[in-house]
Image (cartoon, rainbow, N blue to C red):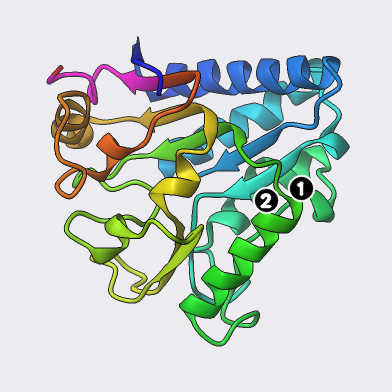
Amino acid sequence: MSEARIEVHQDAAELATSVAGELLNRISDAQAAGHVPHIGLTGGTIADAIHREVARLAAESGVDWGAVEFWFGDERYVAADSPDRNAGQARAAFLDEVGVPDHRIHEMASTADAGSVDEGAAAYAEEISARGSGQFDVLMLGVGPDGHIASLFPGYPQLDVEDAIAVGVTDSPKPPPERISLTFPALNRSTSVWFLVSGEGKADAVAAALGGADVHDTPAAGVSGSEETVWFLDRGSASKI
């Protein structure tokens, strides 16, 4: 696994613009090399800002949006039209805006698609096995104040799942309680892992993860890319490293 690189930006807006530009470059470079890149998306405030910057910058990027596969690291198991869904937020911010075809957007199950979070997790695992490339070219992850990533929370049994691609969560410590998440083995099948973190409220988690904390206490410490791991931070989130 790669050693982490840290990039500190002045504020969240600067961070969002930088990450969006870098993502567009990576996708464009992959396509120029004849590759269809697989990108893992995340939710949250800073991710939404990045997605909107992607939409703003997309016209100048030369990216063929019909030749990119988009996946999700986790999802809230709620109604398909719920504003809580990461997929809905990503669609509104940039996927629909730039014209990504539906068959290139791999959403996790909503309550209308599966009878339970476990059924939804199993279905997503099948989707990844059938249509995934075996790894994400770029996986983006937010980090919670408690150090969680995707929907893998400190102290939860899902942290120790080694034999599944995705798992259900039924008692999330933050609402909504039911979620679907990729596991550590699935997340770690990534060429590049980008952590996206903004705000002083995340500073302790960032410091713990970069300091080599136990993944059961700080799950963010448990994911890295095979070739690249980058922590994109603003001054607030970097204040304790």
Q: For the residues labelled 2 and 1, say whether their Cβ atoms are less than 8 Å apart.
A: yes
What amino acid is found at the position of numbered circle 1 in the picture? Asp
Q: To which residue does mark 1 refer?
A: 96
What amino acid is found at the position of numbered circle 2 in the picture? Arg
Q: Which mark is residue 31?
A: none
- Specify the quadrant that holds the C terminus: top left
Residue at left 48%, top 77%?
Answer: 118
Q: To which residue does mark 2 refer?
A: 91
Along the line of sight, which residue is nearer the eye, 17 or 229? Answer: 229
Residue occupying the far front of the picture = 163
Please tell me whether mark 1 sits on a helix, a strand or a loop: helix
Q: Quadrant of residue 233?
A: top left
Could you tell which of marks 2 and 1 lies nearer the N-terminus?
Answer: 2
Place of residue 154 in the rendered image (x, y in percent of width and height, measured from the top left): 19, 54
Residue at left 62%, top 72%?
Answer: 80
Place of residue 78 in the rendered image (x, y in percent of width and height, measured from the top left): 51, 75
Residue at left 75%, top 25%?
Answer: 58
Region of the chain picked out in magenta, as a range: 230-240
